[in-house]
Image (spheres, grey):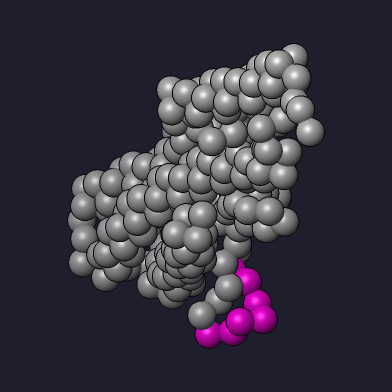
Amino acid sequence: MRVSDKTIYTNFLSSYETSATKMQKTLEQLSTEKQVNSASDDPVAASQIINLKSAVAENSMYASTISSATSWNEAQDSALESISDVMLRMRTLVEEAANGTNTTNDDATIKDEVQEDIKQVVSTLNTKFGDSYLFGGENTTTQPFTLETDDDGNITGLTYNGTDQNLSRQISDGVSVDLFANGSKFLTASNSSDTTSTTTTLGSYFGNLVSALNSGDQSALGSDLLGETDDFRDNFVNIRSTIGTLTERLNSAASVN
């Protein structure tokens, strides 16, 4: 069968266009270093790429959340470590005030130092992380703790201005953690000798301690107030341990991410 020149020419053009298209696609892949540059190149692969990019973007967001949450916890850990040290110093001062051998000047000096320690504790509880208070619950923009004083400047109590909620953060698909923020947890502490009871509030403890130092009430200083100093310090330590456990979980989540 004779093949016409027109048929040969038509077939040549078709093959040429096909080769040129393939060459153009190859050159585009080489220049962009991408096998798929548009959905028409490979619809199945394009769909997989879109899904993968979405997953990478989500993981990047979760990684940022995990990093911020870890830094939040580290700031809290540092604050509570400082408070624990101050409370230990306060315990030493309470013991000194209760021994009955101090002069009036000694007692006045101890009271002044204890009040400064209390102010440091409260100042640390009002620590910020960026623009947010660490221990104000969901109310992160208002200073959570305010000391109450009388006309003579003696500390009488403590007011908590925050909420009793923690802060939820999503760290992976369907997985969330609650960052500790509920400062009301500092206001009471379980009695070490009876886990079913609680001591007085932190504010009352501060006020009673200063009042006892003012009046030289060695009996209260050497018994109830000394025990409450231990209880509240233990409470700070226990909350710090809880935060440390959460930090470990966040570190694991960061590794998985």
Name, please, the residue furthest toward the bottom.
193
Q: Using the image as rendered, state which of residue 175 and residue 199 is in the foreground.
A: 175
Q: Using the image as rendered, state which of residue 195 and residue 239 is in the foreground.
A: 239
Q: Does residue 72 appear left or right of residue 17 in this picture?
A: left
Q: Using the image as rendered, state which of residue 44 and residue 52 is in the foreground.
A: 44
- Residue 128 drawn in magenta: no
Residue 78 spot, x, y in % from top left: 35, 50
Q: Does residue 4 appear left or right of residue 16 in this picture?
A: right
Residue ID at (65%, 49%): 170
Vertical placement of residue 206 versus 116, above or below: below
- Residue 198 drawn in magenta: yes
In the picture, which quadrant includes the N terminus?
top right
Give the prevailing secondary structure in the magenta stretch: strand
Residue 148 spot, x, y in % from top left: 55, 37
Q: Does residue 174 appear left or right of residue 183 in this picture?
A: right
For the record, the magenta segment spans: 193-199
Residue ID at (61%, 82%): 195
Name, please, the residue furthest toward the front.
1
Residue ID at (47%, 55%): 254
Name, please, the residue furthest toward the right.
1
Q: Does residue 135 appear left or right of residue 252 in this picture?
A: right
Vertical placement of residue 117 versus 43, above or below: below
Q: Answer whether residue 123 is visible to the viewer in this image.
A: yes
Residue ID at (67%, 81%): 196
Residue 84 spot, x, y in % from top left: 36, 59
Residue 21 spot, x, y in % from top left: 61, 22
Q: Using the image as rendered, state which of residue 87 and residue 47 is in the foreground.
A: 47
Figure quadrant of residue 226: bottom left
Count of all numbered marks drawn on residues in the image? 0
